[in-house]
Image (spheres, rainbow, N blue to C red):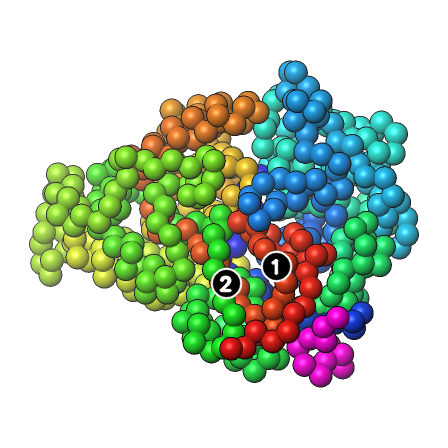
Amino acid sequence: MSARRAPAWILYLLLPAMLLSSCTRSGTDHDVLVFAGPGTEPDTLNPLLTQMSDTADLAILYMPVLLENDAHDHLIPEIATAVPTRSNGGISADGKTIIYHLRHGVVWQDGAPLTARDVAFTFNAIMNPRNDVASRDGYDRISSVRTEGPWTVVVRMKEPYSPIIAQFCNYPTYPILPAHVLARYADLNRVPFDALPIGAGPYKVIDWVRGDHIDFAANPLYWRGKPHIAHLEFRFIASPGTAAVELRTRELGALFNGDPSVYQELLGSGVHVIVSQMNDIHLLLLNQDDPVLKDVRVRRAIAFALQRHLIVEAVVHGLGDRVDADQPTFSWAHTDPKNAATYDPARSRALLTAAGWRVGTGGIRYKDGTPLALSLVGTDDVTAWHQLAVLLQSQLANVGIKASIKTYAAGTYFGAPSDGGILRGGRFQLGYDAVLLGVDPNDEAYYGCDQFAPIGENVVHWCDPVAYRAMKAAVATYDVRQRAEEYAIIQTHIAADVPFVALWQVRRMDAFSVPVIGFDPSPSGETFWNAWAWRLGGSSRN
């Protein structure tokens, strides 16, 4: 399962003012980190129910997972003692059985043991039709989950499905839930756990003050030992500018995955800025059901018309890398499609002319008296949307395409078709979105022929038979080399058929007024995967 769509760039964590004389008190059990980013206030603290990938990231602070995604985009053991492979006996010869051995002695924050029963309960909760989970993709390919004693979990697949290793009870899908707390409920949609969860991560949720902040305290029962930083607070700040000011004045100790709009401002402010790669690709979606965009010549003309390097500089202030398909450049699944479009306005115009669109009044192209006019939609939940939209509008006008900008509230933009959702309802021609795939490169939910929204996330309704066969083949094997060959086929077909234009691959920006030693974010989007190891240093000011 891919991460849920997350257009927002900002999430903020800060700590109780009563504990602070500054952002940190290093070297004691009273150390406090006040920080912000990524995201806004959570919709719930129950990671089973959240619709926000930023909340799934935040949940790593307090909830346990079988495996973690490390700073090198590799899976590493967490509650499981090993990553299942064929060589260690964790994957059966037929590829249908996955075995996890759990660490002994891991306990929930209330002292109850974490056992295989919790993992089996979590699977059943995900598949419970009464629970309002965001997706069951991947989990619906499991035929059974059983326990063999308290420390062994046996997952039986309906068919071989390699992405399950990265998905099962891991970020960015669902962590392990405490059966002893939640098994009493028929569903988990409205239970006390949703606001005050019982976890087994490095931190405990102490308090959620709605509209303001969430307090965390180091978990003394965490299996690796109590974390070095005693307290965290996640404060909700809507404005990137406000977050930058509070960082410079040291009201914030850190800004994680900050908005690109404050990048240049922070570079010269005396705070320490770190830039790293992230598996987050921002896209211009092209709806294949639209009569105009059905013509691949028009889609390719749009791709040739865009000056993506200018977009990166203007919109995200250089915090983006070029990518030509749907796999990040650092992934083992990435390839550089030789047929990818680069900026070439002459070729764009020639393709449009060949498709029957000829220049008319005001430089706009016409076909049979109809202007080449497309709607360009996005959400006001994204800080830079309006700037991006105007830039795209100008670049498309340069080749004779008239783009009219429409902006929607996030709830409408990403909503269900039955609620008038713009993307999932197919009510768009050109649309802006971002996709975070996670560690595994499986892209079937976004581009599979059987994944048209609302069933899946294929909102562009792209169906390429060759690419689709490659998607199916890629998930049916655990052989990385074979999978990479299949993903190369998919990326080549994406570049040729242009169901979307990849605008940029995110380079995340993290900034600190006081060093957080050990901070090393995962490219998969996990900020907090090793928060248990963080320490607070001295002032970072020059």
Q: Quadrant of residue 141?
A: top right
Q: Which x, y percent locates residue 333?
A: 46, 34
- Count every numbered label the image shows and give the total: 2
Q: Which mark is residue 32?
A: none
Q: Which residue is mark 2?
A: 274
Residue at 84% x, 45% y: name it.
106
Residue 175's x, y, as percent? 71, 46
Q: Position of residue 198 (x, y in %)?
A: 81, 55
Residue drawn at x 24%, y 46% is: 342
Residue at (60% x, 76% y) in the render: 539
Looking at the picture, tell me which residue is in the foreground, 222 or 488.
222
The amino acid beneath tag 1 is: Phe
Quarter of the picture holding the N terminus: top right
Query: Is residue 423 left or right of 37 when viewed as pictured?
Result: left
Is 163 or 366 nearer to us in this picture?
Answer: 163
Q: Is residue 478 magenta?
A: no
**Contact (Cβ within 8 Å) of mark 2 with mark 1:** yes
Indicate left or right for 276 with 464 as reference.
right
Residue 109, image quadrant: bottom right
Helix, strand or loop for the magenta stretch, by majority: loop
Q: Amino acid at mark 2?
A: Ile
Q: Is residue 185 visible?
A: no
Name the element at disc 2.
strand
| Residues drawn in magenta | 15-27
Residue marked by disc 1: 519
Separation of marks 2 and 1 at Cα, in angstroms: 10 Å
Crowding at dot 2, Cα within 10 Å, few <14 / some 14-19 / many 20+, comes out as some
Can the viewer see residue 168?
Answer: yes
Is residue 493 left or right of 519 when viewed as pictured? left
Above or below: residue 191 compared with residue 265: above
Compared across the picture, whether 436 is left or right of 374 comes to right
- Mark 1 lies on a secondary structure that is loop
